[in-house]
Image (cartoon, helix red, strand yellow):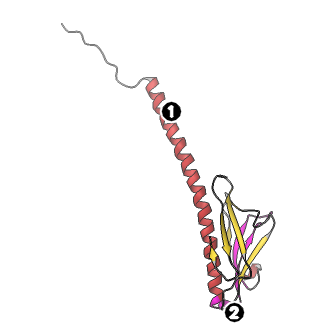
Amino acid sequence: MTIRKSHPKGFTLIELVLVMAIVVILSVFTVVSLTGKKNSNDLSLTVSQAAALLREAQGRSVTQAQGVGWGVRFGNATATAPFYALFYGSYTPTSTVGYYRLPTDVAYATSTIPSGGVVDVVFSQISGLASGTVSVGFQSLSQKSLSSSTISVTAAGAITY
């Protein structure tokens, strides 16, 4: 007669806790990684959209759309969210064509636009020359390790970032 040893089927409590710990650790690393990537994307996307808006204002000035110069206002308001806006002529609510708020984790570098300040970049008709040399800096609020980005506009109308 043979004696059979029974082998329990299933998992022990220690095995289950170990697997759950590994899953939690992997989840934490994934969330941290994705959050950092989102912040980096928000910063670079904001800078490229603002530069594109500057180029659009310059193009509309060159083609004499509305018969006036076009510009972009960068506002670092204290009562409302920081923004940038496309306008024609001089900046007023009725002359604003596009209004864009900065993402919550992106801010203007206060060295370029102080809190409560505004910077207008206006382009001349036909020539597309800028009203002056301007630099607008952007920075991530949530990740200080991310490098800030700056858009530079020369008086000759060159837009770089």
Disc 2 element = helix
Most extreme residue toward the top, as rendered?
1
Dot placed on the residue nearer the N-terminal end, 2 or 1: 1
Which span of residues is magenta-colored? 62-88
Q: Amino acid at mark 1?
A: Ala
Dot 1 crowding, Cα within 10 Å, few <14, some 14–19, many 20+: few
At horizontal 63% and vertical 67% (from top left) the residue drawn is 47
Residue placed furthest toward the left: 1
Element type where label 1 sits in the image: helix
Q: Is residue 117 left or right of residue 2?
A: right
Check residue 21 in the rendering and tell me which mark sits there, or answer none.
1
- The span from disc 2 to disc 1 (Cα, nearest Å) is 66 Å
The residue drawn where x is 63% and y is 55% is 146
Q: Are marks 2 and 1 in contact (CB under 8 Å)?
A: no
Q: Which residue is mark 2?
A: 67
Tell me the residue at 62%/85% (across/down): 59
Decide if residue 91 is on the left or right side of residue 127.
Answer: right
Name the quadrant containing residue 81: bottom right
Residue 95 percent across, percent down from the top left: 73, 82
The quarter of the displayed image where residue 117 is located: bottom right
Q: Nearer the viewer, residue 94 or 118?
A: 118
In this rendering, position of residue 3 left or right of residue 127 = left
For residue 85, which quarter of the picture? bottom right
- In x, y percent, where is residue 34? 54, 51
Q: Quadrant of the N terminus?
A: top left
